[in-house]
Amino acid sequence: MERITFYSYKGGAGRSSTALNTLPYLVEALEANEKSPILVLDMDLDSAGMTYLFELDTHFQDRNQNKTVYDIKDFLRGAQVWPDIVAPVLEEHELYKKFVPVGEKLGVENKAVLFLGVDDRDRIDNNEMDGPNEERLGNLCTFCKKNNFSAVVIDSSAGEQFSAILSMKVATTVVQCMRVTWQFRIGTFNYLERLKEKNTDKEIILLPTVVPNDREIDGILQLQSTIDDVIERINVFQLENINTDFIRIEQFGINEVERFKWKEEVLYKIAKEHALEEDEDKATKRYLKLAQLIASGE
C-alpha cells in the first residue's frame, strides 16, 4: 500500500493545493474505489490546509456540544483504542465511520476518497503529543493496509514540526514541494542533507511548485539557471533516492495557475464542466504525471 506524504520545508509552497489536485488522478492511477479507497490525512495540526480546501472546517463547528466529532489529533492522543484491525465489513468498523467521504469534491466516486481532518482551533502544546504517536499513526496505516485501502495520503505540516517529522517517518514516498526562489532552494536542500544523514531509504520526488513563466533577470533566463542550480545541489550533497523527473526544461515542476491566486479548486472536476485556461490545462497534465509517477513506485 502506498503511503505518500506531501511535504515542504517552508510554508507557502502550494503543498496542499498540489496534493488536492493530484488526488483525482491518483484515484485513477491506483484504481481506487469504495472497496479500495484512499485515505487522506490533514497533519498540518496548527494551520489546517486540506481541511479548509475540502470545506470541512464546519465539521468541527459544534465540537464543544458534539463530542462525537473526531479529528486526527484525537487519534494521535490515543483517545480511543481500536482493538479489531481487520473489519469483516469495513463500513461497520467504528474507525471507518470517523472518516468523511470526499470523492465528490474531487470529481470522483464519493467513497473512493476518505478524509480525516483537523480542528486547528483546538490548540495543542507539542508536549501534549509526546508518546507513541509514530506507533499510533503506523497502526492507522496498518489498518488501511489490512483492509485493502489503495493508499494513505498525508498533507504534512512544513519544516521540522513534530507532525511533519511524523508524516515523513511513515511515508514510503515523499513529494518534496519546493518553490523556485533562492531561499526555498537553500532551505530545502539543507533539509535534504540532514535527511540523508538519517540514512532514509524513502523515494523523494523533487517537485518545484508555483513555477512562473521563464523571464530574464540580470541578463540571465531563470529557468535553465534554476535547473542547473538544482542539479548541482543534488550532486554536491550526493543525494540518493531523489526522483528528478520534474527537473527538466520541457517539464519543470507544477506551473503557476492564475486561478489559484484567488481560489484554489480542483482542476480535474472543473475540466468536466468546461474548458480550462491554458495555464490550468498545463497544470493538469503535470498533476497527472505526478500521480502516475507515485503509482508506478519508480
Image (cartoon, rainbow, N blue to C red):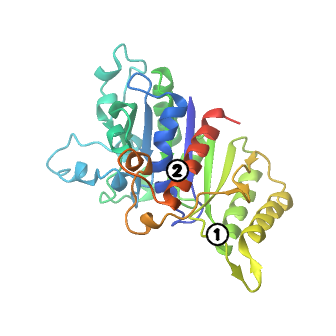
Residue 143 location in percent, x, y? 46, 26
Q: Which residue lies furthest to the front in this view?
A: 275
Along the viewing direction, whichever of 264 and 241 lies nearer the viewer:
264
**Residue at mark 2 to residue at mark 1: CA–CA distance:** 24 Å
From the viewer's perspective, is 220 left or right of 287? Answer: right
Which residue is rendered at x = 36% and y = 54% of the image? 53
Which residue bears the numbered disc 1?
184
Instruction: Tell me the element at label 2.
Output: helix
First-in-chain label (2 vs 1): 1
Q: Which residue lies furthest to the bottom in this view?
A: 218
Q: Residue furthest left?
A: 65
Q: Disc 2 marks which amino acid?
A: Thr
Which residue is rendered at x = 34% and y = 60% of the image? 123
Along the viewing direction, whichever of 192 and 101 lies nearer the viewer:
101
Residue 248's disc is none
Q: Residue furthest top?
A: 88
Residue 284's disc is 2
The nearer-to-camera label among 2 and 1 is 2
The answer to whether residue 137 is above or below residue 49 is above
From the viewer's perspective, is 188 left or right of 280? Answer: right
Would you say residue 132 is visible in this rendering? Answer: no
Q: Quadrant of the C terminus?
A: top right
